[in-house]
Image (spheres, rainbow, N blue to C red):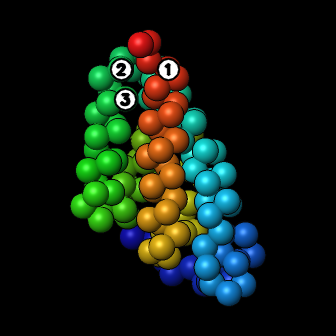
Amino acid sequence: MYSNIPISSLQARGMLFPNGEINNDALTCLSGAVAAPLVQAVWEMSDNNPDTLKRLQSILSNLYEQSRESEAIEVMQLLYEALGIVFPDDVILICNHTEARSYLLFELLVDIDDIVGELMPE
């Protein structure tokens, strides 16, 4: 899907520590920066249709649960492009790092759920 990115690039961007461990805090921040514009744009483009957001959540959650994180990120990138939003380079950087990609997607699902909860009336 994406070309191999050297570990040093991930470390230089602060997504990995020098010892190779993922930087959870950096990935959590990246998640919030990715989730908010995506959910907001989908919400607005769907005329505030809660079912559209629920379907998006369901698709991404199912891909994550099936260990298809790369496909989930591809879906998000496609939506970003279709909505005219620039997809963050940092997300592309981590696509080939399995642990970082998995953690980011987990955090994205949590953030999307939080944002959707704020947008939808009780």
Q: Circle 3 — which element?
A: helix
Where residue 119 is drawn, which disc sits there? 1
Q: Are marks 2 and 1 in contact (CB under 8 Å)?
A: yes
**Badge 1 element:** helix
Residue flagged by tag 2: what amino acid is it? Pro
| Dot 3 alpha-carbon crowd within 10 angstroms: few under 14, some 14 to 19, many 20 or more | many
Residue nearest the observer in this picture, 22 or 56 = 22
Q: Give amino acid for label 1.
A: Leu
- Number of numbered markers: 3
| Mark 2 secondary-structure assignment | helix
- From mark 3 to mark 1, how far is it between C-alphas? 10 Å
Could you tell me how far apart the alpha carbons at marks 2 and 1 are, in whole angstroms?
9 Å
Mark with earlier residue (2, 1): 2
Residue at point 73%, 69% (across, down): 14
- Which residue is disc 2 drawn over? 50
Sequence-earlier tag: 3 or 1: 3
Q: In the image, residue 117 lies at what x, y percent? A: 46, 26
Question: Where 77 falls versus 84 (above or below)?
Answer: below
Residue farthest along the front direction in this orientation: 122
- Side of 120 where 7 appears, left or right: right
- Mark 2, residues whose alpha carbon is within 10 Å: few (<14), some, or many (≥20)? some
Q: Is residue 84 above or below residue 3?
A: above
Q: Are marks 3 and 1 in contact (CB under 8 Å)?
A: yes
Look at mark 3 in the image and give the residue it sits on: 53
